[in-house]
Amino acid sequence: MFGNRNDVPLDRDASSRFLPWLIAMMVYLATMSLVIALTMNKLANRWDQGLSSSLTIQVPSEPSVEKRSTLEQQLKTFIVKIESLDNVSQVELLNDTELNKLMEPWLGKDILLHDLPIPYLISIELDSSSAQTIDEIKLLLSQDIPSASVDDHQRWLGNLLGLTKIIQIIALLVVVLVGGAAALMVILVTRMGLAIHRQVVELFHHMGAHDSYIASRFQFHALKLSIVGGLSGLLLAGITVASFSSLLGQANSAILPTLTFTAGEWGLLLLMPLSASLIAMMTARLTVLRSLALMP
């Protein structure tokens, strides 16, 4: 199948030089698009799991010391009530140190929170996302601290998840388009090979060679070249992924995605050069059979 002998001297064609490079480029683009789709899916799941089961309560600060003391007592009573709910796993009133960390990117280090109208922040973690639990918390809050507001992250989380879904769809669409472009490219290269070796093909055809035999010469030639190009494209994609993974690891940010994949996802990525090779082989075969059917 991959031997040097081929009754049609296709190894001397321009396709032998250009087709592997073109396939490598197609496999690289398709693999990177699939990596983007898988990464966006992981990132969306992480955001959904990390934020859909949490909410933050903001309580405006009072100007006087007496009112702040009264408000802090109300907050302690409110926290006790929240902790008694079934679906609540953790309730935390952020202290000055934690608020300093939150405000540091905007106000710098060593800020004095007592001199600023910084609201009280209560972080609540739920065992599971539950609209009923959120409604109960909002009801208790309206009774105990009417001036407070609840941020359940749903609005901007929904926008982020919608954006990741759009990116996934675009990335998968690119994979499909690259596959179609690869098939079209193989058709053009195969027709070029048929035109170059038309006399040889016609000779075999008139000598009674089966169309499937002649087509097999072209399909195995396309398969051999596409395997070389596909593996090259996959190797280049692997180097790119490893480079980006190293950069993202140095960033160490919870917002950024991580380029880590399961065994099944790695298997899906490894299927890209195989898929490209099969597309090239079947496209070359069908193109030759169609052309031979038109010969007298």
Image (cartoon, rainbow, N blue to C red):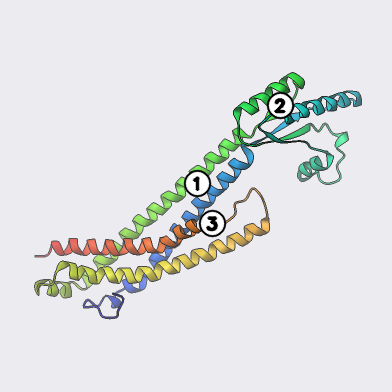
Give the residue number, with chain letter if any, for mark 2: 149
Which amino acid type corresponds to the residue marked 2 in the rendered image? Answer: Ser
View extreme (bottom): residue = 4
Q: What's the residue at 17%, 72% (across, down)? A: 201
Q: What's the residue at 74%, 25% (across, down)? A: 148
Circle 2: element type:
strand
Which amino acid type corresponds to the residue marked 1 in the rendered image? Answer: Ile
Q: Earlier in the sequence, mark 1 or mark 2?
A: 2
Which marked residue is nearer to the observer: mark 1 or mark 3? 3
Give the residue number, with chain letter if any, for mark 3: 261
CA neighbours of label 1 inside 10 A, class few (<14), some (14 to 19), many (20+):
some
Which marked residue is nearer to the observer: mark 1 or mark 2? 2
Q: Quadrant of the C terminus?
A: bottom left
Disc 1 and disc 2: Cα gap in Å? 33 Å
**Residue 167: mark in rendering:** 1
Which marked residue is nearer to the observer: mark 3 or mark 2? 3
* Position of residue 202 measured from the top left corner of the image (x, y, whole percent): 13, 72
Circle 3: element type:
loop
Q: What's the residue at 54%, 57% (across, down)? A: 261
**Residue 119 vertical placement versus 293 (above, below):** above
Disc 3 and disc 2: Cα gap in Å? 39 Å
**Residue 109 vertical placement versus 247 (above, below):** above
User: Would you say residue 26 is visible in this rendering?
Assistant: no
* Position of residue 286 measured from the top left corner of the image (x, y, whole percent): 23, 61
Which amino acid type corresponds to the residue marked 3 in the rendered image? Answer: Phe
State the image quarter where residue 29 is shown.
Answer: bottom left
Circle 1: element type:
helix
Q: Is residue 282 left or right of residue 164?
A: left
CA neighbours of label 2 inside 10 A, class few (<14), some (14 to 19), many (20+):
some
**Residue 26 vertical placement versus 218 (above, below):** above
* Position of residue 6 measured from the top left corner of the image (x, y, whole percent): 24, 78
**CB contact under 8 Å: marks 3 and 2:** no
